[in-house]
Amino acid sequence: MASYTELLKVPGVARIIAAQLTARFPSGMLSLAFLLHVEQQTGSYGTAGLVLAATSIGQAVAGPLTSRLMGRFGMRPVLTLTLIVCTASVLAIALIPPLLPAYLAIGILCGLSTPPVQSAVRTIYPKMVNSRQLTPLFSLDATAQEIIWVVGPVVTTFVSTQIGTVWGILLAAVMMVGGGIWFIASPELGRVRIPRSKRRFGAVLGRPAVLLATVVGFLLIGACAAVEAGVVAVFGHDGAEAGIVLAIFSIGSIAGGLLFGHTPIGPWATARRMLIVFVGTSMAAFGMNFPWLSLSLLVAGVGIAPALAVLFAIVSVSVKFSDTAEAYGWVGTGQLIGAALGSALAGFLIDGYSPVGAFWAASVLSALGVVVAVIGRRWHPDLRGRDASPIPDTEPVPLTPS
């Protein structure tokens, strides 16, 4: 804990963490808000899952592209334009009549215009702290972001069930605008400029560690999305139980992040953390009641923030600074495709079988995450005693004869 306190004393670190968490807070609200709203409007979890999938696919397509554009046009212009379009799309989902084609089209636009806050802030971090502090900062960031998943589902469930699903979405839109403006206005965005990458688009995926982080992130977030849909299906719309269970899920992640934040990152680090997620999601499938789901998802949550922190760190150490934003964009794309797959798969299993089908899906996805992490350990950077900063960009230096 002392190292976290030391980190927060670094000028600007506490401010940028708070600003980016606020800007990204709607991420913890919109999936559940869209799920509740569309299901209420159409009467089908499968349809709601398709809308979530459309949104996630839009985000997946845009992630690496908008992240790379920040190196060309600057962070603030890209973030401002995407914020305007995304907010308008969110408002449209809340206010249009319940027509599936319109929901899908606007969902895709919402995803395509999602502001690349996560790529921006993780590109800024290496310029704010020394190399010794970078890995703990990634861990602190991954742990702190669980506030989004603790508070967001509870607030969304309460507002959507007690006031109305439209108001749940509108509240997320207000948070998106307020947090986005705060983050865009942060001084750090003016002090750090992302160099234009000289590599072709997508070349960073040739880095084994980036590809490993992308695939594992895809499976991890897919499992989490399936869990979220399953919990909502178990407890329905009439109470706060779904939000409370999802909050417990995230509290487990916070505890895991604080517990494992200083653990040295070796080649088996990702596999061990994914194994914890698999154990917890597998336990959840054996009981569809509040006490059992709370306990099993608390266990599963312990592995989430530590796994994400490892993925961020191995990406950082594997690419040049000019490629970090795009690399994190691809990692985000993997996670969003996973969210699309997890939501859609869980939705159809819920409609076709029962809510337990969503937890079957989560178990399979997390098990595949363990397998991929074990197979990929040979390409997993060993960061024990090693600097996690990006590879510096270098330019040829012309020499003149003396």
Image: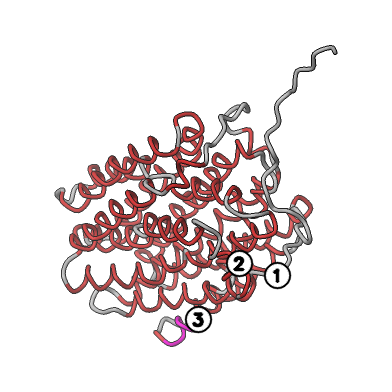
For the residue labelled by badge 3, is the local secondary structure a helix, a strand or a loop? loop
Tally the numbered discs. 3
Q: Earlier in the sequence, mark 1 or mark 2?
A: 1
What colouring style does the render use? secondary structure
Residue at screen point 28% across, 41% down? 84
Residue type (three-letter) at the residue carrying disc 2: Pro
- Residue 339 coordinates in the image, percent (x, y): 45, 55
- Residue 314 coordinates in the image, percent (x, y): 67, 52
For the residue labelled by badge 1, is the local secondary structure a helix, a strand or a loop? loop
Instruction: Give the mark toward the camera: 1 or 2.
Output: 1
Graded by Cα atoms within 10 Å as few (under 14), some (14 to 19) or many (20 or more), the crowding at tag 3 reads some
The residue tagged 3 is 286
Residue at screen point 37% across, 54% down? 23
Pointers 1 and 2 in contact (C-beta within 8 Å): yes
Q: Earlier in the sequence, mark 1 or mark 3?
A: 1
Q: Earlier in the sequence, mark 2 or mark 3?
A: 3
The residue tagged 2 is 306
Residue 139 location, quadrant: bottom right
- Residue 128 coordinates in the image, percent (x, y): 57, 51
**Quadrant containing the N terminus in the rendered view:** bottom right
The extreme top residue here reads 401
Residue 216 vs 328, above or below: the answer is below
Whole-Å distance between the Cαs marked 1 and 3?
A: 31 Å
Residue at screen point 50% across, 42% down? 191
The residue tagged 1 is 263
Is residue 42 rendered to the left or right of residue 212? left
Residue type (three-letter) at the residue carrying disc 1: Thr
Residue type (three-letter) at the residue carrying disc 3: Phe
> Is 35 a magenta residue?
no
- Residue 189 coordinates in the image, percent (x, y): 46, 44
For the record, the magenta segment spans 291-296
